[in-house]
Image: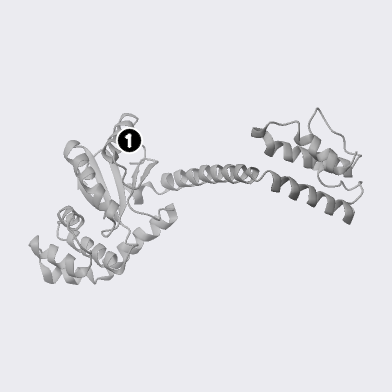
Amino acid sequence: MTLKTTFWNSLNLASTGKRCAAALLGLALLGSAFSPAVPFVSGAARADTVAPTAGGTAFSDEQKKALGDIIKDYLIKNPEIMLEVQNAYDEKSAKEQEARSKAFMAENAKSIFRAPNSSVAGNPDGDITVVEFFDFNCGYCKHGLPEVQKLIAGDKNVRVVFKELPILSKGSEEAAKAALAAKRQGKYWEFHQAMLGSKGQANEASALKVAESLGLDMGKFKTDMASDEVKNELLEMLKLAKAMGVNGTPHFLVGDKSIPGAPEDLHEQLETLVTDFRKNKCPTC
């Protein structure tokens, strides 16, 4: 039996949905053909038969070329296999990322949910914390603001922590520093709502106007905006977002669950997660 016949016969054993497995079986059979001393066991080829064993005969150049041609020919005729492989890889990667994210959140729960200098709205002593990474120039963050306001208004025991993630422009960074300066005068939530609720570009100029409208001490406000303390606080949040793999805004966290973006049912999703974690006594949030 030729190499090509062996390979294609193995593929014919499988349905379309099992072509990937069949392809591997075909490769295993080819390996078995190259290394006849290794047996075919219980209807499935052993993985180590793909390559010659220490006591087997090495593949000749002709055999290597034949194997390469067979595999190439099969993949060209059945390109959907590459999609199956890619989908399997994406699914595996997503699960691994989720596992890494959960482990990181468990290990760094305090800095994520309960950092002493957190920018908080709602009940500061609330039993469940919702975290939002956001950018003042993010249209989706603006779209999600009413949903967050609704959550805070409807749940007197929820605690919302805001983490600046100014990734869209220099103006975003200026506005983020301004928000942290407003926090130092006890006006973070008021500033946050006014900035996200306003039209136009968020930057230093628009932030100064909002600060003035809130009656803040402008001398202190400008000094705090330019301070190393505010700069370092912002850097810590950027570092945290990077470590968690958060690279878009808005991004919401409740316990070990996340909601990327601002879906139309954002309030309902947040409310459901808060209710579930409250019922099960969230160990981190």
Q: Residue at left 18%, top 56%?
A: 188
Q: Residue at left 25%, top 67%?
A: 174
Q: Where's residue 125, x and y in %?
A: 22, 42
Estimate how packed mark 1 is, as few (under 14), some (14 to 19) or many (20 or more) residues with alpha carbons within 10 Å: many
Q: Say what amino acid the circle numbered 1 marks.
A: Leu
Left or right? Give the position of 41 relative to 207.
Answer: right
- Mark 1 = which residue? 273
Q: Residue at left 73%, top 36%?
A: 22
Left or right? Give the position of 267 relative to 34.
Answer: left
Q: Is residue 222 above or below residue 81?
A: below
Q: Is residue 210 above or below residue 282?
A: below
Q: Quadrant of residue 222?
A: bottom left
Q: Nearer the viewer, residue 270 or 29?
A: 29
Residue 138 seen in this snapshot: yes
Name the outermost residue toward the top: 42
Q: Where's residue 245, x and y in %?
A: 44, 53
Q: Quadrant of residue 153?
A: top left
Q: Nearer the viewer, residue 179 or 62?
A: 62
